[in-house]
Amino acid sequence: MTKDDGHTIAADALWQAQRDAVPCGPIHTHLNAGDINAAYAVQQINIERSLAQGGRVIGHKIGLTAKAVQAQMGVDQPDYGTLLSNMIIGDGGTIAADRVLQPKIEAEIAFIMGEDLDIAQPNAADVLRATAFIAPAIEIVDSRIADWKITLLDTIADNASSGLLVLGSPAISPLGFDFTGCEMDMTLNGQSVSTGTGAACMGSPVTAVAWLAEKMRDNGTPIRAGQIILSGALGPMAPVSGKATVEASIGGLGHVSVSFAE
């Protein structure tokens, strides 16, 4: 079996799991151990399939930024994935049961870019200058792999375990916002399930976006004006099952909510 055969087999398994709503087994066995580039190649195969079916790239997400989430997933570094036009759910909206397989929820800060971020070694000042506004967000992470039994290669190949996203309000300028000290609280059916601060996200969500900008420029797909960037969780993620209402608040920024149908 050639390297490309392994990529295709892994991509096919993930694509079929999403299409049939039946999680598959781990796919890292089709890749060379530790080959992160191969995992991103698998991710790209299925992104291109989605685009061929009429999807549109609307941004990117950074995953595994919080140490608490890395510990939950048994990994030691961030990753990234692509946000597509069919992933957006309106603030206060309801997610049908068949839209997700094994959902977990995270609260984070979304950056909406006003300018391209296509420069070498971007820093926090570059990120702030290029950002039009920020908003509170809930990311619904999901896995096509059964029981979330994943390695870093599995989650990267699975588009960084992307599912859906919800943007809250208000949207404000990033200038003057306390990205490090802002406090997050996320509730599930009225009970707090995750708390944290901006410092949990690689020290600051701005730092996380700068990290992503460099990665995306290096692989030839720099961050562009108008894109949404999910900067990473501000605290541990929490599982969701059955009918549920999720609400998240980020101090100094705002609120966001979404419900899951039974």
Image (cartoon, rainbow, N blue to C red):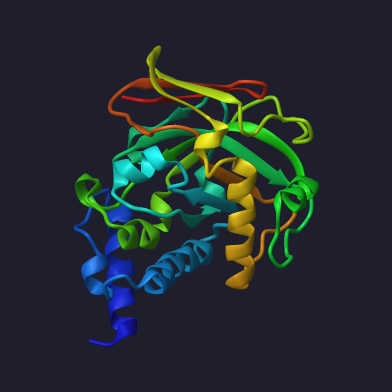
Image coordinates for residue 73, horizontal then vertical, percent: 30, 46
Q: Is residue 214 above or below residue 61?
A: below
Residue at image point 39% right, 33% down: 236
Q: Is residue 227 left or right of residue 260?
A: right
Image coordinates for residue 194, horizontal then vertical, percent: 41, 25
Residue at image point 55% right, 60% down: 54
Residue at image point 58% right, 57% down: 212
Q: Quadrant of residue 49?
A: bottom left
Count of marks, rendered view: 0
Most extreme residue toward the top is 190
Q: Is residue 230 above or below residue 20?
A: above
Image coordinates for residue 151, horizontal then vertical, percent: 28, 57
Residue at image point 33% right, 68% down: 11
Q: Quadrant of the C terminus?
A: top left
Q: Is residue 45 above or below residue 125?
A: below
Q: Is residue 153 above or below residue 61?
A: below
Give the camera-side residue of 162 and 57.
162
Q: Is residue 261 left or right of residue 124?
A: left
**Residue 26 visible at all:** yes
Q: Quadrant of the N terminus?
A: bottom left
Image coordinates for residue 64, horizontal then vertical, percent: 43, 47
**Residue 141 visible at all:** no
